Image: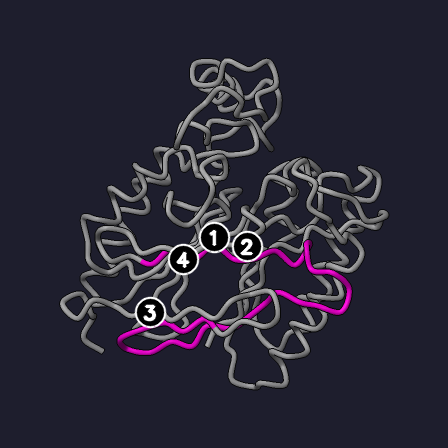
Amino acid sequence: MAAANGLVQYADIPDGRSFLGVPRYYRHSISVLQRAVSTWNKQGNIKFSINFGDTIDGFCPKDKSLWAVQKVIDEFEKFDGPTYHMFGNHCLYNLPRSKLVALLKMPTDSDRAYYDFSPCPEYRFVVLDAYDFSALGWPHDHPVTAAALKLLDEKNPNTDKNSPDGLFGVDRRFVKFNGAVGKEQLSWLNDVLQDASDRRQNVILCSHLPMDPGAVYPAALMWNYDEVMAIVRRYNCVKACFAGHDHKGGYSVDSHGVHHRTLEAALECPPGTSAFGHIEVYPDKLLLVGSDGMADTEMCFRSSDRAAL
């Protein structure tokens, strides 16, 4: 089994509200994580945990960013197994990519923030870097920053590039707090899925940004979700995509039978409540068992797509 934790977005600041007016409980979010880790350890049969990004909040004072990230990491390290991390936009508001890769101990041999692992022979988990191509986290004079800002100028007429005003449908995704999977990573993903298919493995994709319009509101979609899913659809091995970013959570099944589950955020849990869960893995389905604010979700595979286990 795997442990799933939504967005912590910890900051040692008073409670506040999102731009939509939703309450945010910055200090309490780490209490949710502490309860999650304690629950997972008591359960005893959970092999690893996944942190879906936004480890700290963008309002975290910049002189406390390193301290706050380390505080959250320290809580994850109390879990009796490995934790796999990814970037979220709030992480990149606070610290550069290169610093985060090291702090989050991503299992890569470079500064890249995408990787895969197999907790058992039958399954492979693929962690994407949804901000590989973005205006966040790279130096201001970096070519990626310039190219991402150029794309935003072409797609978003607003002076404030974090605003989707005047954009409609899935075009609302072209805002600065989102990003995309870059070309090199797309090629890598294709190679990983080809290898997984050859090995008859079931694949679970993990990304901070959601990749299906049915599982998220449009302004929270990955910029090039369509390119990623076009690669996914070349193969039958991907069974589910898990994501964060949209705090209210969501769920859909796309036209190819891939399940998309956006996880509810710990940040928006009032004191005394929680949002975390664990995933039970079966040959023919996944079962997300949630607590409090995270809904249970059964994800059955299409019979024709099941890997031979």
Which residue is disc 4 drawn over?
116
**Which residue is nearer to you in this view: 36 or 82?**
36
Considering only order in the chain, which callout, 1 or 3, is on the residue closer to the N terminus? 3
* Secondary structure found at label 1: strand
161 relative to 243, above or below: above
* Secondary structure found at label 4: strand
Considering only order in the chain, which callout, 1 or 4, is on the residue closer to the N terminus? 4
Spatial CA span between label 4 and label 1:
15 Å
Which residue is disc 2 drawn over?
52
**Residue 273 in the image, given as x and y percentages of width and height:** 70, 68
Considering only order in the chain, which callout, 4 or 3, is on the residue closer to the N terminus? 4
Which residue is disc 3 drawn over?
123
Considering only order in the chain, which callout, 2 or 3, is on the residue closer to the N terminus? 2
Viewer-nearest of labels 3 and 4? Answer: 3
**Residue 81 in the image, given as x and y percentages of width and height:** 57, 74
Which residue is disc 1 drawn over?
243
52 relative to 278, above or below: above
Q: Residues within 10 Å of mark 3 (few under 14, many from 20)?
A: many
Viewer-nearest of labels 4 and 1? Answer: 1
170 relative to 166, above or below: below
Q: Which residues are magenta?
A: 259-288
Amino acid, disc 3:
Tyr
**Which residue is nearer to you in this view: 299 or 189?**
299
> Number of callouts in the render?
4
Q: Determine contact: label 3, label 4, CB under 8 Å.
A: no
